[in-house]
Amino acid sequence: MERLLAIWIEALSDELPDGSTLRDHLALLDALTILCPFTESIRLDLFVLPLRGPSRFFGGDEAVLKIVRDSVYDVTGYGSSLGVADGLFCAEQAARKGLVLAPGRTEAFRRSLPLSVLGQKDVATTCQRLGLHTVGSFADLDPARVAERFNKHALALHRVARGESAELDTQRDAALVRRLRQLRGEEEVRDEQMGFFGQRGAGDDRADAAAHRVRRRLGADAVLVASLRGGRGPEDRAALVPWGSPSLSVRDVAPWPGQMRAPSPATTLAHPVAVQLRDESDHQIVMGSRGLLSEPPQTLLFSSQMRREIVWHAGPWPLVERWWALNRRRAHLQVLLASGEALLLSAEASHWWLAGIYD
């Protein structure tokens, strides 16, 4: 097996929803590729590269380790843990422990590892019941006995434990290469919403190419797209995230008591506009402590020169949040104007605000 240098950056293990983790990974991959063209991206937190060539070029293993460690910090600002061993599986385990194994020491290191590093809890549990606690003790089992006791996945683990296979089947992130190509703009993005019949037009491709060019020149935050997140009001749920950010794999399923139901306004305002509600006597309408309006609303005032008649309203729906700290009290009110516009208003701190506009 080839002697590999594994670079493990624990800070990149948890992917952030703004896409910064993937961008840091790509920037670091480019930097490491300059040092060694054969650098491989295994997962967001793990890189490997063959050590023999860089060691000859830079003047020894220690020189390579220093250059790599400095490159990781310069590009990402994070510390790294480096390890050297034969094969990907042992190289990663060495990196997690910060060990540089001398040539010929990988076999003993692999045999000393606990069974949990193989990533199959059921196999580890069964082996422990049989008195087997290390990778080496599992490797000493006859392959025929492993096939009788376990399934085909355990046979693949057994080959890794015996040193016949250099890596686990689950060790690499199979989707990472595609995601990095998408981030570079080298591959068509496949997971965006298509047309009614699933088609993708030339205009979509041109828009993607333009967004890539803008982002490369002006930075990741130059192109923003709308995204939904958890919250009670529409103004809480709407957020702008950098274009190309990964979608969250876990959907927000929190109950959010008091959350406004559909339909939601098509437009929410980042900076709500102050408005006034007036009754038929042109008196200001206020919301009482029990969440009731002082009078039915008749007029909406944007300014002294801009008044609109209200022909229908629904609500208000009071919300009391963070009673243990901020004790934020607010309410939402839907109104329909005589001109046909439907608006969402919010009341907070004795003021009314325009929070959203319906189609």
Image: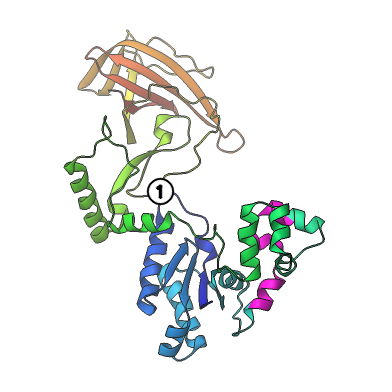
Main SS of the magenta part reads: helix
Q: Is residue 272 visible?
A: no
The answer to whether residue 129 is magenta is no
Q: Seen in the image, is 351 located left or right of residue 342?
A: right
Q: Which residues are magenta?
A: 107-124
Q: Seen in the image, is 284 located left or right of residue 258?
A: left
Q: Position of residue 168 (x, y in %)?
A: 57, 62
In the image, what residue occupies the spot 26% across and 33% down?
A: 195
> Is residue 322 depicted above or below 133 in this figure?
above
Of 35 and 2, which appears nearest the observer? 2
Which quadrant holds residue 239? top left
Q: Position of residue 258 (x, y in %)?
A: 52, 24
Q: Is residue 309 visible?
A: yes
Q: Which residue is mark 1?
A: 246
Q: How many marks?
A: 1
In the image, what residue occupies the spot 35% across and 13% down?
A: 283
Of 53 and 239, which appears nearest the observer? 53
Q: What amino acid does circle 1 point to? A: Pro
Q: Seen in the image, is 100 located left or right of residue 32?
A: right
In the image, what residue occupies the spot 39% across and 78% down?
A: 36
